[in-house]
Amino acid sequence: MTLSRLTSISLATALCAFGAAAHAETVKIAIAGPMSGSVAQYGDMVKAGALTAIEQINAAYSMGANRWQVIRHVVIPAALPDILTGMRIAIGFGWTTLVAAEMVAATSGLGQMVLNASNFLRTDVVIMGIGLIGLIAYTFDLLMRKTEKWLVPWKGRM
């Protein structure tokens, strides 16, 4: 699938979710839109990681490794850093979309709280809400970085 096709599917998913939204929980399905657009990023990341390991794959085969050993010991370790980077990017897009969807059509959530407070000129609530949204996003990023450091300690050392 091309990126434009995935984007069309993402947009259609989001529009259907917003059109059929009777409750706040239904709207949160719209997060699948940007996440499906990120599938293309995952594919590119995996392909880039696997392409850099071609020489290592050939070396493993020449040393007598079978297919599953090559996948487990060469391909996955080579592709994992790029997969985790793609996941980190996708989490950022997903979080942004969730907050935006709450601002558009939800009856609860941080996005709705910030939008509602801005309508009533409650600047303190708006600033606190924006700070909390940023803090949660930063926490997601820190957790992904720690996960990346734990799963892929060799990243950036080659």
Image (cartoon, rainbow, N blue to C red):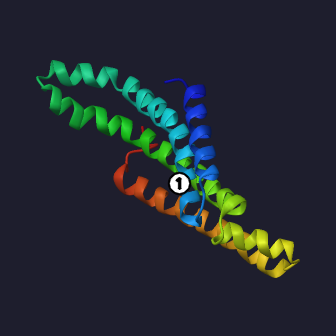
Mark 1 crowdedness (10 Å alpha carbons): few <14, some 14-19, many ≥20 = some
Q: Residue at x 55, y 66 (%)?
A: 139
Drawn side of residue 152 relative to residue 142, left or right:
left
Tell me the residue at 41%/57% (across/down): 147
The spot of residue 158 in percent (x, y) is 42, 37
Q: Considering depth in this image, is 136 or 35 the residue closer to the camera?
A: 35
Residue 111 lies in quadrant: bottom right
> As drawn, is 93 to the left or to the right of 130?
left
* Percent of width and height locating residue 6: 55, 31
x, y percentage for residue 122? 84, 80
Q: Is 102 rendered above or below residue 89? A: below
What residue did someone put label 1 on? 29
73 to the left or right of 39: left
Rendering coords of residue 119 (x, y %): 85, 72
Judge left or right: residue 158 versus residue 35.
left
Residue at horizontal 44 percent and vertical 46 percent from the top: 84
Residue at x 54%, y 64% (from the top left corner): 25
Q: Secondary structure at mark 1?
A: helix
Which residue type does callout 1 highlight?
Ile
Report the label total. Answer: 1
Q: Residue furthest right?
A: 121
Query: To which quarter of the image does residue 13 belong?
Result: top right
Among the 4 quarters of the image, the one containing residue 103:
bottom right
